[in-house]
Amino acid sequence: MIAGMPTVLTPSHTVESRGPLRDLRRRRMLTQQDLADLSGLHRSTIIRLEQEPESAYMQTIIKLAAALSMDPYELRDLFETPDA
């Protein structure tokens, strides 16, 4: 938190991310809408992938990787969940 800045909670801030996308997006100081615009995906897709990363298709990962200036296979590896 930045000193002197008010804390504003929106519905998207109240759900914990189970995957890497939220962290990657925040490190690049992007909103969900920013990432949606850069990737050509709908904001609802970004929200879903932040909550359910295992549901990402490779075509979607390629679009996100381009928007985040990442290698698609590196991003795919971050999305994969280890077998239990």
Image (cartoon, rainbow, N blue to C red):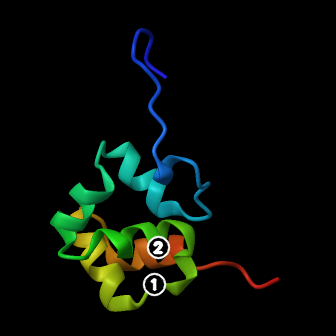
In the current view of this chain or complex, which residue is farthest to the top? 4
Q: Quadrant of residue 6?
A: top left
| Amino acid on which the number 1 mark rests in the picture | Ala
Image mark for residue 56: 1
Q: Measuring from the top left, give residue 44's x and y in whole percent.
A: 36, 72
The amino acid type found where label 2 is placed reads: Leu
Q: Residue at x 51, y 47 (%)?
A: 13
Instruction: Where is residue 74? Give x, y as percent.
Output: 42, 72
Q: Residue at x 40, y 79 (%)?
A: 73
Residue most extreme to the right = 84
User: Does residue 14 appear left or right of residue 2 in this picture?
Assistant: right
* Residue 5 x %, y %: 39, 16
Q: Residue at x 41, y 54 (%)?
A: 24
Q: CA distance from mark 1 to mark 2?
A: 7 Å
The reply to whether discs 1 and 2 touch (Cβ–Cβ < 8 Å) is yes
Residue 51, position as x, y percentages in the image: 55, 68
Q: Secondary structure at mark 1?
A: loop
Classify residue 3 as left or right of residue 33: right
Q: Is residue 21 above or below residue 82?
A: above
Tell me the number on the disc at residue 49. 2
Query: At numbered mark 2, what does the secondary structure look like: helix, strand or loop?
Result: helix
Please say whether residue 68 is visible from this viewpoint: no
Quadrant where the C terminus sits is bottom right
Tell me, yes or no, if residue 8 can be seen here: yes
